[in-house]
Amino acid sequence: MIKVTRLSGEVLYLNVFQIESMESIPETKIKMMNGYYFLVKDSVDSVIDQIKSFMHSCVVFSGQE
């Protein structure tokens, strides 16, 4: 899960495996696989960084970082 903030300030936690696409318009629009989308304050780059960190944490072997 990644943490993003809606334009209203509400915090959301999204399943990275359900993200279909992202668009910068200038806020970030995250489209989910079910067709819903969220407008968030986070930049596309920061969301991508969170996704990378999440994926890295899933595959790191103990003792290796």
Image (cartoon, rainbow, N blue to C red):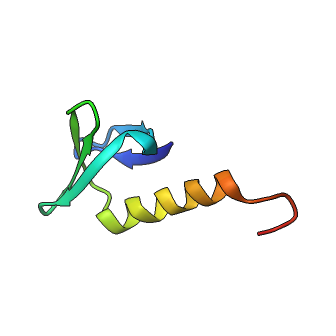
Q: Is residue 63 left or right of residue 14?
A: right
Quarter location, residue 55: bottom right
At which x and y percent is residue 42? Answer: 32, 58
Q: Is residue 39 above or below residue 36?
A: below
Along the line of sight, the residue nearer the viewer: 26 or 62: 62
Q: Is residue 43 left or right of residue 14?
A: left
Residue found at the very far left of the displayed protein: 25
Residue found at the very far top of the displayed protein: 34
Q: Is residue 1 left or right of residue 33?
A: right
Along the line of sight, the residue nearer the viewer: 26 or 65: 65
At which x and y percent is residue 25? Answer: 12, 60
Q: Is residue 8 left or right of residue 18?
A: left
- Tell me which residue sits at (85%, 58%) in the image: 62
- Tell me which residue sits at (45%, 46%) in the image: 3
Q: Quadrant of the C terminus?
A: bottom right
Q: Is residue 35 above or below residue 50?
A: above
At which x and y percent is residue 31? Answer: 23, 44
- Tell me which residue sits at (28%, 39%) in the image: 32
All told, the count of numbered labels is: 0
Q: Is residue 62 above or below residue 39?
A: below
At which x and y percent is residue 27? Answer: 18, 58
